[in-house]
Image (tube, rainbow, N blue to C red):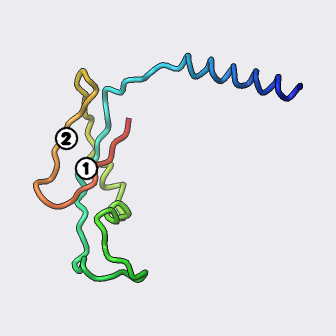
């Protein structure tokens, strides 16, 4: 019975805490990029595990963060909280955001 009472009190306190939480609207973002990422030359061949190359593997690329963050700029959001940034005309690139 004592466990049930303590569990109920913990659940009530957590419910009140979640109810009191406010939404935070971020209006400025720190943006670094675009950092170009190239596909392998032989994208049609298999890797050491016997699997073909997939585009999602580009997210596992090594990125020099010191160079990427050195050129970071501040992007301001519009009244709806949306931001826009330029994408490269061709190829793939990574963008880094922080707030």
Residue occupying image coordinates x 19% and y 41%: 85
Please determine whether, in this image, residue 24 is positioned above or below residue 90.
Answer: above
Report which quarter residue 40 is drawn in.
bottom left
Q: Name the quadrant of the N terminus.
A: top right
Please determine whether, in this image, residue 53 is positioned above or below residue 5.
Answer: below
Query: What residue does disc 2 label?
Result: 85
How far apart are the alpha carbons under marks 1 and 2?
9 Å
Q: Position of residue 33 (x, y in %)?
A: 25, 50
Which numbered disc covers residue 33? 1
Residue occupying image coordinates x 25% and y 34%: 75
Please determine whether, in this image, residue 10 is positioned above or below residue 62.
Answer: above
Circles 1 and 2, Cβ within 8 Å, touching? The answer is yes
Total residue callouts: 2
Which structural element holds mark 2?
loop
Which residue ends up furthest to the left in the rendered image? 89
Q: Position of residue 28 (x, y in %)?
A: 31, 29
Residue occupying image coordinates x 81% and y 25%: 6
Report which quarter residue 57 is drawn in.
bottom left
Please determine whether, in this image, residue 81 is positioned above or below residue 19.
Answer: below
């Amino acid at each position: 019975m004592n466990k049930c009472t303590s569990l109920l009190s913990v659940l009530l306190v957590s419910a009140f805490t979640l109810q009191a939480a406010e939404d935070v609207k971020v209006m400025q973002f720190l943006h670094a990029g675009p950092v170009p990422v190239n596909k392998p030359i032989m994208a049609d061949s298999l890797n050491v595990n016997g699997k073909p190359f997939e585009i999602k593997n580009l997210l596992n690329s090594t990125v020099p963060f010191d160079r990427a963050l050195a050129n970071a700029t501040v992007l301001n959001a519009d009244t709806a909280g949306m931001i826009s940034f330029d994408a490269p005309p061709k190829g793939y690139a990574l963008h880094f955001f922080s707030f």
